[in-house]
């Protein structure tokens, strides 16, 4: 099997699974329980929180465990909007955000907030001048994803932070689900107030994630109850998941120090696909993360390519996994001025550090054969 759908989800690391099983078996007490067994579980949870904070260069109390990227984005955006609505009702985001951001913005609009959606250029990157022009006295939040989940474009997070560094009442949220472990980011050195990532994107388990929240930022909680996670995310903590997440993050950040093989595979695929007739590559190497490639084959729908490759035991996706079953033209590609035909036919290859160049060569061979056969049918 060749698995090139890592931006949808990754295979859990064996060492991470071993950690999860060990903790779930030996530390199953509720961390909120008063007895000694519960106290040991609480201590282990706190240790994992501290480890994650240290790796990210932030404070332990700034780490909130979540169930993943969607929950983290909801908590960050709605939590901040409702907490600071007395200061203003204006939010800025982009037209290429993940549905867990885009749909939250639509809900906030229906509740009286005003949202500005920034355009992106052909590289999938926002214009900083447009951002500056959109800022008002009422702007309380900017939410921009670090790495786009469909084409891999990287946004100028440093520059965005610098733009609002002196704006005391404007906060900056980053959906970094696709960037963590792939694109280096010094959170503690940047003007980022909130940042989201999800464990299953870097070989941890599904149902695990983190929301970084600067200690001076207040959020209205999404989940009320027992007051866990400093009152921001009630519910019995997923202790084993949190410990396993910390281990997976350490491994991911170690891999991040050496992306040469990942880049070699990405560049090989980009070159070979661009060389093939009637192919359009939507990922611009100079502006993209090292693990995502998006392209279209002229005259062929994305799901046709996905299922044809599936028969060869090769797995890719039609752009975002979260909206792939809707069979709609990619909103990200349409925002990049890609035609409807190409946007509907787009597919995504997403790599992990476990992939090899030999797999990429097999993929290209099979892709060429599939396109040739499909063209014969069309003719």
Image (tube, helix red, strand yellow):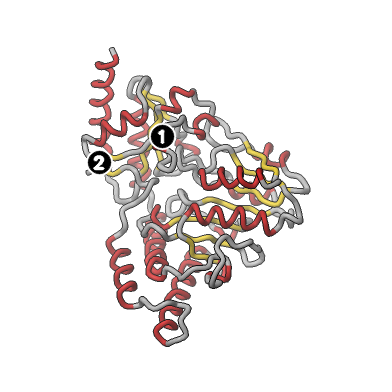
Helix, strand or loop at label 2? It is: helix
Dividing the image into 4 quarters, which one contains the C terminus?
A: top left
Q: Nearer the viewer, residue 193 or 190?
A: 193
Q: Which mark is residue 40?
A: none
Residue 92 place in picture, x, y as percent = 66, 44
Q: Residue visible at 41% across and 56% down?
A: 257
Task: Quickly name the residue at label 1.
Answer: 294
Helix, strand or loop at label 1? It is: strand
Distance between mark 1 and mark 2 Cα atoms: 17 Å
Residue 180 visible to an observer of this rendering: yes
The tag earlier along the polypeptide, 1 or 2, is: 1
Residue 171 place in picture, x, y as percent = 67, 54
Task: Quickly name the residue at label 2.
Answer: 359
Q: Nearer the viewer, mark 1 or mark 2?
A: 1
Q: Residue visible at 42% across and 87% down?
A: 36
Dot 2, how many residues are within 10 Å of its Cα: few (below 14), some (14-19), or many (20+)?
Answer: some
Dividing the image into 4 quarters, which one contains the N terminus?
A: top left
Residue 3 relative to residue 162: left or right: left
Above or below residue 38? Residue 170 is above
Dot 1, how many residues are within 10 Å of its Cα: few (below 14), some (14-19), or many (20+)?
Answer: many
Residue 366 place in picture, x, y as percent = 23, 31
Residue 293 place in picture, x, y as percent = 40, 37
């Amino acid at each position: 099997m060749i698995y090139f759908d890592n931006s949808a989800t990754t295979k859990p690391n064996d060492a991470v699974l071993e950690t999860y099983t060990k903790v779930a078996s030996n530390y199953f007490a509720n961390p909120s329980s008063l007895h000694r067994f519960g106290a040991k579980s609480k201590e282990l949870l706190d240790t994992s929180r501290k480890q994650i904070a240290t790796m990210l260069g932030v404070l332990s109390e700034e780490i909130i465990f979540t169930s993943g990227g969607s929950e983290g984005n909801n908590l960050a955006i709605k939590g901040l909007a409702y907490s600071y609505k007395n200061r203003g009702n204006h939010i800025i985001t982009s037209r290429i955000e993940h549905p867990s951001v885009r749909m939250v913005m639509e809900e906030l609009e229906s509740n009286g907030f005003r949202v500005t959606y920034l355009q992106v250029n052909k590289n999938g990157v926002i214009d900083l001048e447009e951002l500056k022009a959109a800022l008002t006295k009422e702007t309380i939040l900017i939410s921009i994803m670090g790495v786009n989940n469909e084409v891999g474009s990287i946004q100028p997070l440093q520059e965005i932070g610098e733009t609002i560094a002196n704006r005391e009442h404007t906060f900056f949220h980053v959906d970094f689900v696709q960037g963590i472990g792939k694109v280096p980011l010094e959170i503690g050195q940047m003007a980022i107030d909130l940042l989201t990532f999800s464990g299953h994107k870097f070989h941890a388990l599904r149902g695990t994630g983190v929301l970084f929240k600067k200690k001076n930022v207040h959020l209205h909680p999404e989940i009320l109850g027992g007051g866990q996670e400093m009152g921001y995310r009630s519910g019995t903590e997923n202790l084993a998941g949190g410990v396993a997440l910390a281990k997976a993050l350490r491994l991911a950040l170690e891999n991040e120090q050496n992306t040469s093989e990942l880049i070699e595979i990405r560049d090989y695929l980009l070159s070979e696909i661009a060389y093939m007739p009637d192919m359009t590559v939507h990922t611009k190497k100079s502006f993209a993360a090292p693990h995502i490639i998006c392209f279209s084959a002229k005259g062929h729908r994305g799901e046709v390519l996905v299922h044809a490759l599936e028969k060869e035991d090769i797995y890719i996706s039609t752009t975002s996994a979260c909206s792939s079953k809707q069979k709609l033209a990619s909103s990200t590609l349409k925002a990049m001025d890609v035609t409807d035909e190409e946007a509907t036919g787009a597919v995504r290859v997403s790599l992990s550090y476990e992939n090899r160049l030999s797999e990429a060569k097999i993929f290209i061979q099979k892709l060429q054969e599939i396109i040739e056969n499909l063209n014969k049918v069309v003719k």
